[in-house]
Image: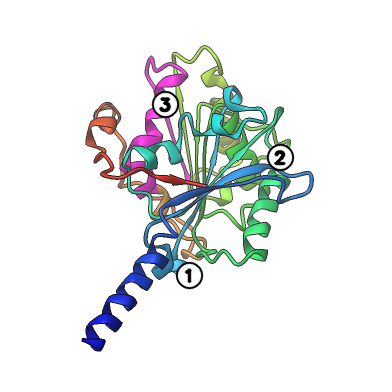
Amino acid sequence: MKRCVLVCLLALSVLCNYAQYDLVSAKKNVIPGGYNFWLYTPEDYYYSQESTPLLVFLHGASLCGRNMDRVLRYGTIDAIKRGLDVPALVVAPQNPGGAWSPRKLNDILEWLDANDYTYDHQRVYVIGMSLGGYGTMDFVGTYPDKIAAGMALCGGCSLKDQTKLGEVPLWIIHGTGDRAVSVRESQKVVDGLKRNRLTQRLRYDWIRGASHGALSRYFYSQKTYEWLFSHRLNDVGRPVERSIDITQGDLQEAYRKMQKRVDQLEFE
C-alpha cells in the first residue's frame, strides 16, 4: 500500500513539473529599454532543454504598439495555439514602433542566457513577415554567428552592408502581387548577394500574384519549421537545405492539416 502511494505521489510530482510547460508567458519590462516579449516553452522542454531549438518570431507593422495581445493575432505562437507542433522555445517580441533593432533582439537572447533558459545555441532561428521580414534580414546580417537560419517573408533589408547575409542559410519569399511592400525590396537584396557571389546559402521564391497577407500561411505550415530546424550553426560549410519545398498546395492545406488542440494553450 505504501509503495502504491509513493508511486502515485512520484507520478503526480512528474505531472506537476510537466504541467509547467506547453505555456506562453509574458515578459514585460525585464530588459531596461528593450522589447517586451512572449516566451513559449514547449511541452517536452523539461526533458529536452539542452537540445531545444530557439525560434524568434518578428511581427509586421500592424502589430506594433504596447498591447502585447496584438502579437498573438498571427504567427508562430498563434499556430501553436491552433495545434501546430513547434518543438522549440519561441520568442515573440513586440516592437513599439519603427524598425526592428538587431541589438535589442540580441538583448533578449542574452536575457534568456542570464535567466537560465537552456537551449541549443547551435540552433537559433528567426522568421518574420513584412516589417518582421526586414527585421529578420537585419538580425541575420548583424549576428550571422548566432543565427543558424532565417526565413524572411515579404520584407527587405535596411543594412548598408548586406554581405554577411551570405554567411547564413536564408530563405527570402515575396509575392509579386504585394501592394504593401513591393517585391522589389526582396529582389534588391537577392541582386546584391548575386553581385557579390554570395548566393550559395540563399534560397528565394517570388510567389506569382500573391498578396502581402497571403504569405502569413507560412507560419502555419509544418514544413516551414522543418526547413528552419534542419540547420545548425556548426554545420560544416553551413549549407542551405534545398530538398524541403513548401508548395502552394502545402500553403493552401496548412490550416486544414493542423491537428486541433484537445486542450487550450496556457498563458501567464
Q: Which residues are magenta?
A: 202-227
Q: Image point 64% across, 64% down: which residue?
A: 115
Q: In x, y percent, where is residue 49?
A: 46, 67
Comes first in the chain, label 3 or label 1: 1
- Residue 101 bears which disc, if any? 2
Residue drawn at x 37%, y 62% is: 44
Give the label, 3 or 1, closer to the camera.
1
Question: Which residue corresponds to mark 1?
Answer: 50
Q: Any mark on residue 215, and which? A: 3
Label 3 Cα neighbours within 10 Å, binned few <14 / some 14-19 / many ≥20:
some
Q: Quadrant of residue 58?
A: top right
Q: Mark 2: which amino acid?
A: Ser
In the image shown, does 65 or 244 lie closer to the viewer?
A: 65
Residue 266, labelled with which disc?
none
**Does any portion of residue 189 appear in the rendered image?**
no
Q: In the current view of this chain or complex, which residue is farthest to the bottom?
A: 2
- The spot of residue 172 in percent (x, y) is 48, 35
